[in-house]
Amino acid sequence: MSDLRDLYQEVILDHNKRPRNFRVIDPHSHKADGFNPLCGDRVTVFLDVQDNIITDVAFQGNGCAISSASASLMTEALKGKPVAEVEKLFQNFHDVVTGESEPSASLGKLAVLAGVRDYPSRVKCATLAWHAVRAALENRTETVATE
Ligand code: ZN
């Protein structure tokens, strides 16, 4: 198990250092800002949705390693997915990072964040970008706060 933890740690550090899809999408179909006052993490997510498929998704912002890595991993997970699957994937991810369920294969690489369950104050760091994406897809324009 400790080897697996080391591997997870490595993936998180890599995504923090070299975030994937860290850019602005212009023009975009959806956008939202998220803020986690507990930690100070800020994220802006951009989506391009065509025929109910997420054809592109990216983010900007700054925050702790967990929030940046989670946003980066999320963009990889959501690209090419139907909008209808976002909520299901989010609930799955949320249950894993809060320790309510064990990671399943459908979670893919997002499972590397499962260790967050041991640090309850970091759950909001890990879910911030997801809250922003959900707000963007619902066309909510106010900044989403995790509190
Ligand atoms: Zn944070």
Image (tube, rainbow, N blue to C red):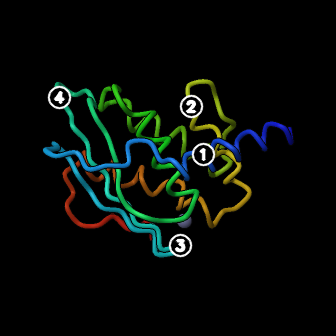
Respond yes or no on whether mark 3 lies under 8 Å from ligand 1.
Answer: yes
**Which residue has dot 3 on it?**
39
Respond yes or no on whether mark 4 lies under 8 Å from ligand 1.
Answer: no
In 3D space, how far apart are the residues under numbered discs 1 and 3 (Cα atoms)?
A: 20 Å
In 3D space, how far apart are the residues under numbered discs 1 and 4 (Cα atoms)?
A: 30 Å
Q: Which mark is residue 52?
A: none
In 3D space, how far apart are the residues under numbered discs 2 and 4 (Cα atoms)?
A: 24 Å
At 23% from the left and 48% from the top, the residue drawn is 138
In 3D space, how far apart are the residues under numbered discs 3 and 4 (Cα atoms)?
A: 34 Å
In 3D space, how far apart are the residues under numbered discs 1 and 2 (Cα atoms)?
A: 19 Å
What kind of residue is marked 2?
Leu
**Which residue has dot 1 on it?**
14
**Which residue has dot 4 on it?**
50
Which of the two labelled residues, at mark 1 and mark 3, occupies the earlier sequence position? 1
Q: Which mark is residue 107?
A: 2
Image-quadrant location for residue 95: top right
Which of the two labelled residues, at mark 3 and mark 4, occupies the earlier sequence position? 3
At 31% from the left and 26% from the top, the residue drawn is 82
Residue 100 placement (x, y as % from top left): 66, 45
